[in-house]
Amino acid sequence: LHKCVYCYAGCYDTKRVQPLKHLPHRVEEELKEIAQEPAKIYFSPTCDAFQPSDEVQNVTYDIIKSVFTHTKTTYISFLTKGIIRSDTLELLLKHPNRVYAQIGLCSVDETLIHRTEPGAGAPEDRLRQIRKLLEGGVRTTV
């Protein structure tokens, strides 16, 4: 959905993203069953977890909530050019020592970003998001 001109994900059929709505439940069930919790869960940059889609962001929120609910130390790690919805940002900020955020930002030039990353968050919105994450104690890189 970001439709970045330089992204290899464009090789896939990206006309429509189909979120796996059952995924949060499966993650929860697996976390309950495993003997040792995973050190980290990384949300793939190929399918940005914070795309401009309520369906995608709902699944992302539910998975993150399950991880924080059913593990004690598992990290959440992600790379995004999207805007993290406020409810998810609030959830991440409640667990700053268990989050590693990477925010992609190759320019602050609005015109360039609009041309190269048409579905991604505006640079000023990403910068504001970075500031909130850092102020909340979340390890964040750009």
Image: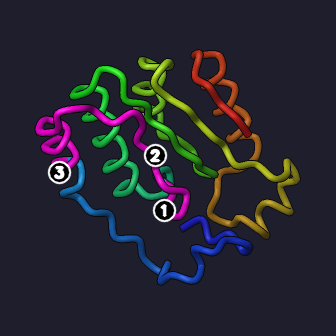
- State which quadrant residue 68 falls in: top left
Choose the circle earlier in sequence order: 1 or 3. 3
| Residue 55 in the image, given as x and y percentages of width and height | 34, 57
Residue, x 36% and y 22% (percent of image)?
73
Residue closest to the eye, 122 or 44: 44
Can you identify the residue that label 1 sits on?
47
Identify residue type, mark 2: Tyr
Residue 127, picture quadrant: top right
* Mark nearer the N terminus (2 vs 1): 2
Q: Secondary structure at mark 2?
A: strand
Q: Which residue is mark 3?
A: 26
The reply, left or right, for residue 130 in relation to residue 12 is right
Label 3 crowd bin: few (<14), some (14–19), many (20+), radius 10 Å: few
Image quarter (top left, top right, bottom left or bottom right) of the C terminus: top right
Q: What amino acid does circle 1 point to? A: Cys
For label 1, the SS is: loop
Callout 2 touching callout 3 (CB < 8 Å): no
- The count of marks equals 3
Give the CA distance from mark 2 to mark 1.
11 Å
Q: For this rendering, which residue is in front, 39 or 100?
A: 39
Residue beneath disc 2 = 42
x and y, in percent, of residue 15 in the image:
48, 81
Task: Give the magenta-colored segment's residue range.
Answer: 25-48
Instruction: Give the residue type at disc 3.
Output: Arg
Q: Is residue 112 above or below residue 106?
A: below
Q: Residues within 10 Å of mark 2 (few under 14, many from 20)?
A: few
Name the residue: 76% across, 46% down.
123
Q: Tell which circle, 2 or 3, labels the residue nearer the N-terminal end.
A: 3
Q: CA distance from mark 2 to mark 3?
A: 16 Å
